Image (spheres, helix red, strand yellow):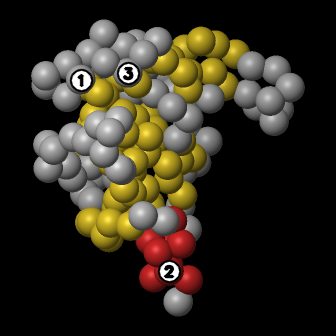
Amino acid sequence: MAARTGIDGGAESWFYVSRDRGRTWSGPHAFTGLHQTGVAARTDLIAIDRNHALFMLSRSKRDGNEGQCMCVETIDGGLSFSWKSDLPFDGDGYAIMPTSVLPDRSVLTVVRRGRGIEEGGWLEAFRSMDYGKTWEPLGVALGLAVILAPWSR
């Protein structure tokens, strides 16, 4: 489980670990080695094996406002983390709240996009065939069923 203090440039994040399906927890643990500002972690974790995992996180943009998604990696069971990649982002508005699945040997991530409270938002989907090193845009949709349709064929 991941948590954060906020969503802007001053946000700090941490995570907790449960090895018994949520009965007990250890933590909070720092994202040690991750030299990024404004990390706004939400729980989006892709476990690859016992020690290797990807965390899909949001972080602040260069202007200090919320809004860009990235992939970070641990290969030592969460003792240290390194930045792996940024998801494609055109800089317009914000890209937050990634949510991911591992349907086969690829990572499918859907990101919440928008420009502000008064304007409608949308979802954008991306796929990585190399565990988050590079990302291929899959398209934009207003509903998850539209995005997932190609995966069900």
Label disc, if present, on residue 149 of the rendered structure: 2
Q: Residues within 10 Å of mark 1 (few under 14, many from 20)?
A: some
- How far apart marks 2 and 1 lie (CA) works out to 33 Å
Q: Quadrant of residue 84?
A: top left
Q: Which residue is label 3 attached to?
A: 7
Q: Which residue is label 1 attached to?
A: 65
Q: Earlier in the sequence, mark 3 or mark 1?
A: 3
Label disc, if present, on residue 41 of the rendered structure: none
Q: Residues within 10 Å of mark 2 (few under 14, many from 20)?
A: few
What residue do we see at 32% from left, 66% from top?
140
- How far apart marks 3 and 1 lie (CA) works out to 8 Å
- The percent coordinates of residue 71 (x first, y second) are 35, 42
> Label 3 sits on what residue type?
Ile
> Which residue is nearer to you in this view: 9 or 78?
9
What residue do we see at 55% from left, 68% from top?
103
Q: Earlier in the sequence, mark 2 or mark 1?
A: 1
Judged from the image, the secondary structure of the residue bearing numbered disc 1 is: loop
